[in-house]
Structure formats: structure tokens, C-alpha cells
Image: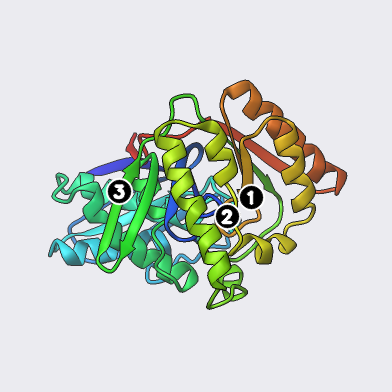
Amino acid sequence: MKSVRASAPATVANVSCGFDIFGFAVASPADEVVVTLTDKPGVVIREIVGDGGRLPLDASRNTSSVAVIEYLKAIKSEQGAEITLYKHLALGSGMGSSAASSVAALVAINHLHGEPLSRKELLPFAMESERIACGSAHADNVAPSLLGGFVLIRGYDPLDVTSIPTPEGLYATLVHPHLELKTEDSRRVLKASIPLKDAITQWGNIAGLVVGLMKPDYGLIGRSLKDVVAEPIRSVLIPGFDRIKEEAVKAGALGCGISGSGPTIFALSTDEATAQRVGQAMQAQFTDLKLKSDVYVSEINNAGAKIL
Ligand code: HSE
């Protein structure tokens, strides 16, 4: 039977000011899948490696299989699929773990069928998986994981997704403390409405970040990496957050914030050496708090998910 291996990278959603509308892909970590076509209809998860037995093997509840089920329905395929999932992204990390699994599976199944759908056309299936994972079909993890680069979700209804060019040499640092936060819980604590004053601050920063990336203007990028909507509420769930942010900027980062719904913290820097130094400074703070952490440093990953 035809079989293919695919990988999909971790992502930083929100990027401080762009709650549910900005996200970018990084080089690692990335989830991998092996998908095999079967003659029988139906989707089966054969094995999940690396999740410590925590993810559901029930195909109707796993993000990778849900995406494939929706895809096969849409292309009216009479074939089925078997999925083996290699989890390299920690669960509840804020790095788009559920998104990476569904995106890798979608890219693989689409490849096995001769790519009838474009990457953008795969997005709704991956978003459906996000709904299964956390109750909300946000696209700011799945879109950059699928498409690569820095992505803007201009609108959800109808879906309007576009890429924002980023300056060459812009590096991201991700520091993942060994804690878990469920996206569902981190969304529930947010307020349903915000004061007009905060909205003005937020949309100024959103516009500033886009202009800063496109010019490029590093000072403007740094000034725009601010979030007055989600970060003040969510940051209390991340030990040492304010101090870590201060240390990241002191070490040379342009700015720093929560990756997705946390607890991973991201920073952006103008070069690799600074990004590495920023990572060490951030990790040292978690170590002081007796928290183990992993550091990932990479350029913005413009390729996104790939067939291996
Ligand atoms: N935009 C989503 C949130 C991303 O912040 O809840 C979750 O990874």
C-alpha cells in the first residue's frame, strides 16, 4: 500500500498583539506522521510514539485522524488511511502541538492522493481539528504550520489568510518550561470584551508589527511586540514571566511574549548569536525557579510542513 512520511513544525501564535490573527512557523520541534492508504474506508491510528500514552487512539478524537477523516469526506474518497504519529511537540506547550499533528497528517494524505487540494484549501480541515482539541477553530497555529512563514488571518468568515514577509535573519527563541497549560483553559480566562482604550493600543501595535516586519524596522517591531489583551491575564499562569521578559530584552531581544496560550515564551532577535544569548538568559530564570526548560532557536521557517 502507498505510504508517506510528513512533518509539520511548531508555531508561535498571537505573536503578542495579534490574538488569533498572527502566527509564524519555526524550524523545530516538528511532529511527524506516516500515513498509509488502505482500500477499506475508515481511518485508524496505528500507533502514537512519544506522547507517553496520553493522546487518544480513537480516530474520532485525535487531531491528526479527525483532519484526515474530514479531508477524505471532502474529496469523496472511498479509501481509508492508517496513521502512525511521532509526537515531538510537548502537549499543552503553547507551540501548536495539536496543530502540528493534524497539519502533518493532512499534508501526507493530500500527497498520497496526488495533491488535489492546495495548502490553503487544507486549512479548514486542520481548523476543525483545533475545534476538537480545544473547542475553538482558531487558525493561527495551523495556518503557519501548513503554509510556513509569518501568517495573518485577516478574517475567519470567510477565511482570509495572507503571508507577511519577514526580514531575512530574524530569529525566534522559544523557551518551553516543563509545565502544561490547556488552550481551552487559557481561553476561558479571557474577557469577552475589552475597553476601547485597550483596543486602540492593540490595533496600533498590530499595524506597527506588520509595517515593522515589511520595511523592515527593528525598532518598530520591538515597540509593537506588546499585548494588552491576553498577556496581562495569562502571564500570571507562567512562573517568572515578567522577569523573564525583562531579561530577554536586556540580553538583546527586540521583544518577548507568550507563545500561543503558553507556557512557552518566545522572543525575536535580529541575529542568531543574540537569539542564543536571549535563550540562555530566559532559561536561567526558569532554572532559578527550579523549572526545567527546553530552548529552541531558529529563523522563521518559510517552508512549513513537508513531505520527508
Ligand atoms: N490564538 C490561540 C490562543 C492560540 O491564544 O488561544 C492557541 O495556541
* Residue at image location 38% in from the left, 56% down from the top: 102
Could you say where residue 234 lies in the image, as x and y percent from the top left? 66, 64
Q: Position of residue 256 (x, y in %)?
A: 64, 44
Amino acid at the residue labelled 1: Thr
For the residue marked with disc 2, what is the amino acid?
Gly
| Observer-nearest of 79 and 231 | 231
Q: Could you say whether the residue bearing mark 1 is in a helix, strand or loop?
A: loop
Among the two numbered marks 3 and 2 on one chain, the one whose residue lies closer to the N terminus: 2
Query: Which mark is drawn over residue 162?
Result: 3
Q: Quadrant of the C terminus?
A: top left
Cα separation between marks 1 and 3: 25 Å
**Residue lying furthest top:** 273
Disc 2 versus disc 1: distance between alpha carbons?
6 Å
x and y percentages locating residue 114 in the rendered image = 14, 44
User: Residue at label 2?
Assistant: 94
Q: Return the residue nearer the eye: 244 or 114.
A: 244
Residue holding disc 1: 264
- The local crowd at label 3, few if under 14, some if 14 to 19, many if 20 or more residues have their Cα within 10 Å, is some
Q: Nearer the viewer, residue 173 or 59?
A: 173
**Label 1 CB, ligand 1: below 8 Å?**
no
Asked if ligand 1 lies within 8 A of label 3, the reply is no
Q: Nearer the viewer, mark 1 or mark 3?
A: 3
Disc 2 vs disc 1: Cβ atoms closer than 8 Å? yes
